[in-house]
């Protein structure tokens, strides 16, 4: 009798485990209103480069940098490689995102950034004219600086480089005034980039 | 009961088995803690605690080399139940021990409930934004959405386990089915040589998928990829690459309707909405040291008529609809709040267990105290009796 009770308890446990496993195998169906704001926001920074999310820490070399004085790295969600807290007034956001391969290409990404601050897309010739190159220990970094005009406008400073098949985007964006105040330190951070094989 | 059964019964009810199980648990806890460095919390707990055995790879073979948490827990529960049934008499004098045992058994049972039924999801929401769904970041789904209706979407989610199993998966209630050619939990997506890519449709046309080992660290995320044929009425419409790397769903037309296809973290829609009214990140004056993170959210549930504001802050989650919404992280210059959403039907069990164990110990202590006082009284009475008898 006692044995039977123990066996029943075991069977019940196994049955519960089985039911919970089956639930996760079935195709689910939801009917939801087309609410534009209903989609959960991706963790911070996913506007950065784009249509493609980062694959987490890439195999091989990671990127390292030296934080400017007063800056700190913050936890901005698992989709970002890094985020920064910047001691300036106003809305400003700085991030590092890494994507596999060319991530849609330089022209597409730059034009997407321009679109985000209300600017018209560039062609290849204009892209080359807008590009500045910063020498870093991680290799040459292509840097762009765009502003949508006026003190209340938006501004974006971003650098991109390719390391071992991954494209890295380091981006500073926000209100023109705030970005302008943080730009000097941001350029120092770009200049300090280096490859760290241990990450 | 024959001799073999008696031996098994003796082993099951022995205190030695309890000690062995507790020792095994200590080994597992140490190994699991150390493994978190290379596997992350989730990976280490899954390997050492939420498995039946710890396996070792020997070439193409895998052999179990140590019982993992599930096995040890189950043996311990069986041991406790069996020992209780065999040794403890159902008397008032043993009531405390019965309650303590019941509490311990409930504690282990609660862990099985948690392992089997707990889901961890995330809600990332910006100030002013309203959300009606949460995402399970460690489970993917292939979302196929019938977007033809201007007012509502029919969202079908093919779970990751079905994708990993492969084969043809019908989408119930639609003329569609998907045939899974490849699914990889983590992958690298590369531009293939001409003709090397099976992908003929959508944003992934011409790309090839190279499998990678899944990431283990808590801070990393897999780039999952599925290569699927979409079928309508038995005919293939082409081959798509779906990956959580693509943020935009890929549109296609089938059976006279407009659809989209995307691989994304499993999404669970809620019958209510949460609007983030304000996220606060307070620091100690003059420092960057965080003092408090809090999210003021507006909860609107049309089915119950609720419309109220709730403040979620550290260790003060919103418990609603069987879920607990904890303040977990933030971003975007303190305008984005990330809430951890935990649904665990057994969340109360550990609390009840602790209460039962405490109560049982108190009852047992009270019974022992009463017995001790009575014995002391009896011991005092005896010399007095002898003295009286001697004087008489």
Image (cartoon, coloured by chain):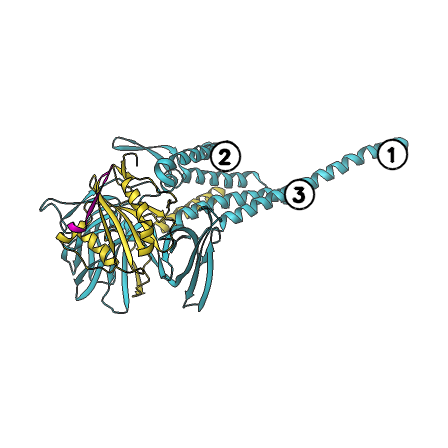
Chain colours: A yellow, B cyan
- Determine if residue B158 is in view: no
At which x and y percent is residue B306?
A: 45, 67
- Range covered by the magenta-colored residues: A128-139
Q: Which mark is residue B366?
A: 3
- Circle 3: element type: helix
* Residue occupied by mark 2: B18
The chain letter for the residue carrying disc 3 is B
The chain letter for the residue carrying disc 1 is B
Callout 2–callout 3 Cβ contact below 8 Å: no
At which x and y percent is residue B58?
A: 28, 30
- Circle 1: element type: helix
First-in-chain label (1 vs 3): 3
Label 1, label 3: how far apart the Cα atoms are? 33 Å
- Is A136 one of the magenta-colored residues? yes
In the picture, measured across the screen, residue B333 lies left or right of residue B350, that is: left
Between circles 1 and 3, the one closer to the viewer is 3
Residue for point 90% across, 32% down: B391
Q: Residues within 10 Å of mark 2 (few under 14, many from 20)?
A: many
First-in-chain label (2 vs 3): 2
């Amino acid at each position: 009798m006692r044995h039977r009770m123990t066996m029943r308890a075991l069977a019940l446990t196994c049955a519960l485990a089985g039911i919970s496993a089956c639930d996760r195998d079935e195709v689910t169906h939801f009917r939801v209103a087309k609410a534009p704001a209903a989609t959960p926001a991706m963790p911070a920074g996913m506007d950065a480069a784009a249509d493609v999310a980062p694959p987490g820490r890439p195999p091989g070399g990671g990127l390292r940098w030296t934080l400017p004085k007063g800056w700190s790295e913050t936890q901005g969600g698992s989709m970002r490689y890094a985020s920064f807290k910047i001691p300036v007034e106003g809305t400003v956001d700085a991030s590092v995102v890494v994507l596999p391969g060319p991530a849609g290409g330089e022209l597409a990404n730059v034009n997407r950034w321009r679109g985000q601050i209300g600017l018209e897309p560039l062609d290849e010739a204009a892209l080359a004219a807008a590009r500045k190159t910063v020498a870093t220990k991680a290799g040459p970094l292509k840097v762009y600086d765009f502003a949508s005009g006026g003190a209340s406008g938006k501004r974006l400073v971003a650098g991109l480089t390719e390391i071992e098949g991954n494209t890295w985007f380091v981006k500073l964006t926000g209100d023109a005034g705030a970005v302008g105040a943080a730009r000097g330190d941001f350029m120092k951070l770009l200049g300090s980039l280096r490859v760290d094989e241990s990450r | 009961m024959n001799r073999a059964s008696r031996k098994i019964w003796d082993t099951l009810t022995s205190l030695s088995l309890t000690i062995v199980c507790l020792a095994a648990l200590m080994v597992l806890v140490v190994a699991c803690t150390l493994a978190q460095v290379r596997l992350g919390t989730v990976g280490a707990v899954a390997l050492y605690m939420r498995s039946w055995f710890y396996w070792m790879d020997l070439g193409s073979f895998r052999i179990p080399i140590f019982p993992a948490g599930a096995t040890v827990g189950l043996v311990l529960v069986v041991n406790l139940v069996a020992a209780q049934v065999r040794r403890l008499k159902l008397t008032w004098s043993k009531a405390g021990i019965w309650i303590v045992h019941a509490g311990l058994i409930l504690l282990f049972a609660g862990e099985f409930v948690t392992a089997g039924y707990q889901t961890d999801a995330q809600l990332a929401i910006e100030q002013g934004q309203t959300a009606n769904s949460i995402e399970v970041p460690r489970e993917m789904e292939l979302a196929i959405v019938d977007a033809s209706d201007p007012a509502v979407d029919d969202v079908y989610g093919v779970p990751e386990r079905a994708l990993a199993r492969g084969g043809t998966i019908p989408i119930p209630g639609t003329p569609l089915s998907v045939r899974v050619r490849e699914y990889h939990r983590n992958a690298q997506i590369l531009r293939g040589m001409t003709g090397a890519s099976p992908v003929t449709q959508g944003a992934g046309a011409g790309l090839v998928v190279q499998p990678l080992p899944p990431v283990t660290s808590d801070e990393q995320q897999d780039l999952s990829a599925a290569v699927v044929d979409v079928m309508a009425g038995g005919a293939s419409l082409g081959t798509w690459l779906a990956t959580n790397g693509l943020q935009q769903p890929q549109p296609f037309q089938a059976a006279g309707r407009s659809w989209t296809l995307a691989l994304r973290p499993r999404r669970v829609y809620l019958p209510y909405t949460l609007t983030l009214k304000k996220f606060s990140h307070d620091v100690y004056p003059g420092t960057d040291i965080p003092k408090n993170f809090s999210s003021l959210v507006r909860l609107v549930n049309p089915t119950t008529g609720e419309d109220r504001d709730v403040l979620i802050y550290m260790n003060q989650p919103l418990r609603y609809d069987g879920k607990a919404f904890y303040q977990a992280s933030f971003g975007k210059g303190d305008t984005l709040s990330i809430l951890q959403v935990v649904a665990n039907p057994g969340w109360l069990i550990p609390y009840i267990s602790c209460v039962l164990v405490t109560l049982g110990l108190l009852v047992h202590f009270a019974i022992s105290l009463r017995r001790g006082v009575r014995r002391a009284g009896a011991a005092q009475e005896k010399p007095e009796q002898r003295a009286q008898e001697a004087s008489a």
